[in-house]
Image (cartoon, helix red, strand yellow):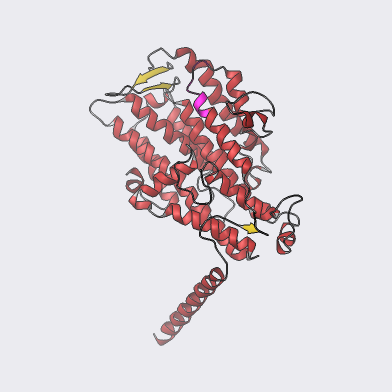
Amino acid sequence: MKKFLSIAAVATVLLTSCSSDDDNEKNNINTPSTYSFLRNGESTVNFGGQTTRIAMATELVSALSVNTNTKASLQAMFNHAEGDQDFTHADLNASNKNVRSKVAASNDFFATNTTLSNTIKQDFDGWITDQADNVFPSWNVTASAGVAGNLQQLGSTTVRYFNAKGLELNQAVAKGLIGGLMADQMLNNYLSIGVLDAGSNVQNNDNDVVEEGKTYTTMEHKWDEAYGYLYGAEENPESPVLDADRFLNTYLRQVNDDDDFSGIADEVYEALKLGRAAIVAKNYKVRDAQVAVIRENISKVIAVRAVHYLQGAKSDLEATTIDYAHAFHELSEGFGFLYSLQFTRKPGTGMPYINNAQVNSYINTLLAGNGFWDVSVETLDTISAEIATAFGFTVEQAAN
């Protein structure tokens, strides 16, 4: 017994010591109150490319709800070429960036798996094509099993438009981009150790060697680009208020507003600030610890909303009078978040919490036969429970 207590006491001391050491390292880093970093009086923060791609994705999703648009114009918005007049904003048209090239394009997940990357890009191509070729021509048709068209929500003037499987394709694209573009680039590319420490990045950061004509080191810039995929649409990105876009930013707010996950937004913001400050301080241990915090919490946002919408659809389908328009809208949002699960990142691993094969299994189950017209509440419960278990929360917590 005395031996056991002695071992336990030593373990406690070691754990306390390690925790104290970590706290001391953090305390020795000058973390600003907002995401503002200067060198010689000039800002070193830049993520213009991320702001541009969020704006392009926003216009694309909106365009998917305008039935006079053509497949060619929608695909051009997705795969924009510099100078083409694809958008309403001149700066977007002049940009050499586009959305498609950055979908499923992270260093860690897809640099050595271009086959899967191309397959995922083709999924987005397929949703856009289905909307233009099948949903737009059926804009004034009442949707039914196997028939694309519209459904009006009960007690509302809101009309939704679905493909033959009951899938609202603009929602599939929008929520799919949260994972396929924003989360994948953030968690698996710009916060990748392989990207942050590539080439001479560490040596240059240690010696404050900035990129030619810039105020920032390459490592600082990569971290900022991750920040941009979350806060790039904010009016004042230094002090984000959330709800600034229709992608990851707004859903971080929605999850944070759930009492079961309250504080998650601050945890992400503080980790991004501390990690960036750690780069300035050349403390890569603290930097890497913040990467883990960010990966866990951003991944959780996607999982919580997937379960939330699947459970919302379940409630609709269990009602005495089923509002199919609202149920299929919830299912479509859940579908997009479920698709995005393959881009999450489990800290300490090189893997998502739920991989591509598992995601495809879920999707094939939901779209079997007549798709959402045939889906059962038991299926929704099974998928919800498996996701919740993988991420360490309960279905009830996410369903709120």
Is 325 rendered above or below residue 188? above
Q: Tell me if residue 233 is in the magenta stretch.
A: no
When the figure is inspected, residue 174 is found, relative to residue 146, above or below; the finding is below
- Compared across the picture, whether 7 is left or right of 110 comes to left
Please state which of residues 286 and 90 is positioned toward the viewer in this rendering.
Answer: 90
Please name the predominant secondary structure of the magenta segment in the image: loop
Relative to 49, residue 73 above or below: above
Instruction: Specify whether 309 is left or right of 13.
Output: left
Q: Where is residue 386 shown, x and y percent of the image? A: 41, 45
- Taking the image as drawn, is residue 399 in sight? yes
Residue 321 x/y as whole percent: 24, 25
Q: Residue at x 57, y 66 (%)?
A: 30
Q: Residue at x 35, y 39 (%)?
A: 381
> Of 394 and 81, which appears nearest the observer?
81
Q: Check the picture and name the quadrant holding the N terminus.
A: bottom left
Highlighted magenta segment, given as a residue range: 61-68
Quarter of the figure that contains the C terminus: top left
- Residue at 48% of width from left, 82% of height from top? 10
Picture coordinates of residue 22, whole percent (x, y): 53, 70
